[in-house]
Image (cartoon, rainbow, N blue to C red):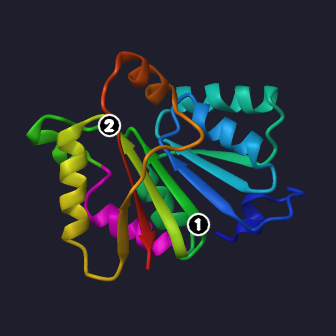
Amino acid sequence: MPIQDIFEGFQGASETLVLEIGFGKGHFLRNYAKACPQYYFLGIERFLQWTRHTKKRLIKDECLNVKLLCGLAQDVLRDYFENDIFDEIHVLFPDPWPKRRHHKHRILQKPYLELFHQKLKSGGALHITTDHKDYFNDAMKAFETLKPGLFKVVEKQDYPFKTNYQIKYEREGRPIYFFQANKI
């Protein structure tokens, strides 16, 4: 899908496209979009309730540089977007599916990481944050299973914009794990 079709009528000067997968209540997405009105933002959320909630807040905040889609991110990305389109992809506090029998549902596994690589522009960045140490370790192992030369994984300390989960977990004193995978 050409970026012009998604953001028809958008008056921004930039061709920068930022994606957040699983935006929930949209706190991160809204604040980032307000701070960078020259960027295009796209959010994909699987729950209609949160898509509607976030849409209302975006309208209230007059964030005209954000579009929302409801669906499974892997299906939407695979079926509707060309390759090399996103400058940034954010996967922040994804469901860790902690039970072993549910691990197949995790978004941070090899097939999805390969899909993210296809959709990122050269030099683009995949930003990941979780409070679940086992999921973080498993995600790092998933990156190791990829063909060499797809991503360079680097530690990241924090983002200037936070999700509701991050704000809550910081108050509770939980450890938070940040990392970034840059497309080579």
Crowd tier of the residue under label 1, counting other residues whose Cα lies within 10 Å: few below 14, some 14–19, many 20 or above = many
| Front-lying residue, 18 or 151 | 151
Residues in magenta, as a range:
107-121
Q: Determine which of the numbered discs, if any, sits on residue 95 in the image.
A: 2
- Which quarter shows the C terminus? bottom left
Marks 2 and 1, how far apart in space?
A: 22 Å
- Residue picked out by circle 1: 86
- Front residue of 154 and 96: 154
Q: Earlier in the sequence, mark 2 or mark 1?
A: 1
State if disc 1 and disc 2 touch (CB < 8 Å).
Answer: no
Count the numbered circles shown.
2
Secondary structure under tag 2 reads: loop
Q: Nearer the viewer, residue 78 or 126?
A: 126
Q: Is residue 182 above or below residue 67?
A: below
The residue shown at (25%, 47%) is 136
Would residue 120 be found to the left or right of residue 143 on screen? right
Q: Amino acid at mark 1?
A: Phe
Q: Which one is in front, 57 or 147? A: 147
Question: Is residue 139 located in the magenta-colored stretch of the structure?
Answer: no
Identify the amino acid type marked 2. Asp
